[in-house]
Image (cartoon, grey):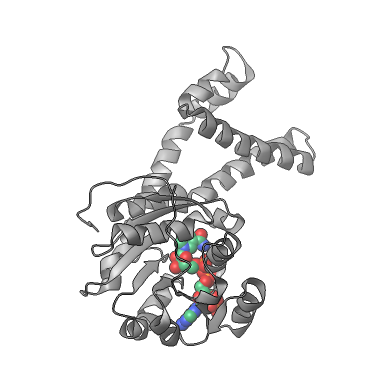
Amino acid sequence: MGTGRKSTSQESTNHVAVNSMKLAFIGAGNMAEAIVAGIVEKGVVDPGEVCVTDIDEDRLAHFVEQYGVGRSSGNSAAAAEADVVVLSVKPQVFPSVWPEIAAALKPDALVVSIMAGIPSAKIAGGRPLRVVRVMPNTPALVGAGAAGIAAGIFATAADLEIAKSLLGAVGVAVVVDEEQIDAVTALSGSGPAYVFYLLEAMLEAAGQMGLEPATARRLALATVAGAAKLMDESGEPADVLRRKVTSKGGTTEAAIGTMEERDVKKSVVAALLAAQARSKELACG
Ligand SMILES: NC(=O)c1ccc[n+]([C@@H]2O[C@H](COP(=O)([O-])OP(=O)(O)OC[C@H]3O[C@@H](n4cnc5c(N)ncnc54)[C@H](OP(=O)(O)O)[C@@H]3O)[C@@H](O)[C@H]2O)c1
């Protein structure tokens, strides 16, 4: 879905003050909890200005107790009060909840959707509604997320800043064009699963080589985190860093050579392209 905007990829660096705004989270699930925890703990919002809704009373009670936010069992009542409405229900729930929420929105409300696969134009439904789409990932649950943020056609630069403030509280938030959201889904949305898959394989090999599971887990996790940190802080490309640890005739060369023989890199590229294609299919409904 094109927004007609020029590419605006950039990391979250500055935050607009959203603590004077009323926020409503529609759907108090895992991802909503990650974001609410982050924005409350980091002081991005005053918890008294945040309201969550859910069909599960226990979830609402948990949010109130844990984060000091307000609760509502009515989606439209919560939306009617909010300056920013965060759609954090599952995409399949969207068609049933959206009509009553849309009808209740304040005229100048901003809608931030974290729902996968629902284009901003579908949410706007032909009205001049300001929608920002977000593709988060599960490491947001531990404050280490990576989110792509895209402006719908009527969203402003200030709206993007609001979304960056919310998602920046739980990790990295990067602005992209909406047509790139499927690529973001394939890269960072689904990305944690690729790393877990690699870790599964590394730990299986560690077991075959006789390492204790706890020892192997500690070493493997520190290796993944350390490699990411080294690449981030050195600013060097991945292939340069890889070559630096691959001496001729050495152990790393034996490993990488085996991967190259088996076309592992091509398989990973094909996997991400398949994820992007599937994301596009899902968005078309
Ligand atoms: N998890 C991820 O990795 C990830 C990544 C990117 C994007 N997202 C998106 O984030 C969104 C939320 O995902 P999640 O993992 O947080 O899902 P989730 O834990 O299932 O959260 C959704 C919440 O909405 C509640 N709900 C259902 N019907 C409702 C209604 N009519 N009104 C209000 N609340 C209602 C659900 O209650 P019940 O459980 O009782 O049905 C649940 O508590 C999804 O749209 C997903 O596409 C997730």
Task: Look at the picture and state if 86 lies above or below 256.
Answer: below
In this orientation, which residue lies closer to the viewer: 265 or 145?
Answer: 145
Q: Would residue 255 appear left or right of 82 to someone viewing this image?
A: right
Q: Quadrant of residue 244?
A: top right
Left or right, 200 with reference to 93: right
Q: Position of residue 50 (x, y in %)?
A: 51, 74
- Where residue 177 sits in the image (x, y, percent)? 29, 52
Check the image and report above or below for 252 versus 42.
above
Quarter of the image with the C terminus in it? bottom left
Residue 282 appears in the figure = no
Query: In percent of the image, x 59 and y 80: which residue is there?
Result: 60
Question: Which residue corresponds to the image point at 47% horizontal and 25% vertical from the top-left?
Answer: 239
Residue toward you, 26 or 48? 48
Image spot of residue 54 (x, y percent): 52, 81
- List the single residue furthest toward the top: 248
Q: Quadrant of the N terminus?
A: bottom left
Q: Residue at x 64, y 77 (%)?
A: 62
Q: How many marks?
A: 0
Quarter of the rendering containing residue 221: top right
Residue drawn 53% across and 63% down?
Answer: 35
Q: Is residue 131 above or below residue 238?
A: below
Whether residue 220 is situated above or below residue 187 in the rendered picture? above
Which x, y percent locates residue 211? 78, 36
89 or 92: nearer the viewer: 89
Whether residue 107 is visible here, answered yes or no, is yes
